[in-house]
Amino acid sequence: MSFLKRSPWILHYAATSCNGCDIELLACLTPLYDLERFGIINTGNPKHADILLVTGSVNEESRRVLENLYQQMPEPKAVLAIGACAMSGGIFHPAYNVYGGIDQVIPVDVYVPGCAARPEAIIDGVVQVLAILDERTKTRKRQRRAAVQAQERHP
């Protein structure tokens, strides 16, 4: 089991949501659901985050912020789109200023459906993201090992 799988740090960004999914996400951190049992720490700094949790649809203002947060996160990183708005724009999709889901701006690894998404579904999504992060970490280690071995053979 990799270090990331045991203690990932999450960064939550509420794009342009109605706050329904935000409240459900915060419920995941309470003792009733206890998302922290997976070793997860909620951080406010994208440079420390492994997982980006996004709620709400994307408009021009949130697009810039979302791209900036994603670019600041170190590799390996994963993105979780929470709720119908993050997936497709939800009820706000027909609005003139809404691009749609966050996958129009950044790559998304796991989608959690719902309006608002239930805490159980959010926790299932986080567990799926942990498996993705674990695989990416293993892949990066194999690539680094191969690069070191190639350099040793041909200095």
Image: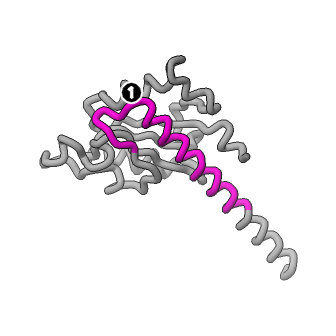
The image quadrant of residue 143 is bottom right
Secondary-structure class at tag 1: helix
In the figure, 91 relative to 26: above or below?
A: below
The image quadrant of residue 16 is top left
- Which quadrant is the C terminus positioned in? bottom right
Left or right, 124 with respect to 16, comes to right
Near-viewer residue (22 or 43): 22
122 drawn magenta: yes
Q: Residues within 10 Å of mark 1 (few under 14, many from 20)?
A: some
Q: Position of residue 73 (x, y in %)?
A: 54, 47
- The residue to which callout 1 is attached is 24
Near-viewer residue (152 or 20): 20
Left or right, 100 with respect to 151, comes to left
Q: Position of residue 119 (x, y in %)?
A: 43, 30
Query: What amino acid is labelled 1 in the image?
Result: Glu
In the figure, 96 relative to 40: above or below?
A: below
Residue at image point 45% right, 40% down: 53
Residue at image point 78% right, 66% down: 145
- The colour style of the image is one colour
Near-viewer residue (124 or 147): 124
Residue stretch rendered in magenta on the structure: 112-141
Left or right, 141 with respect to 60, comes to right
Q: Specify the farthest residue to the bottom.
A: 154
The image quadrant of residue 107 is bottom left
Residue at image point 25% right, 30% down: 18
> Please, what is the dominant secondary structure of the magenta stretch?
helix
Q: Position of residue 10 (x, y in %)?
A: 53, 36
Q: Position of residue 43 (x, y in %)?
A: 54, 31
In the figure, 65 relative to 20: above or below?
A: below
Q: Specify the farthest residue to the top.
A: 31
Near-viewer residue (113 or 48): 113
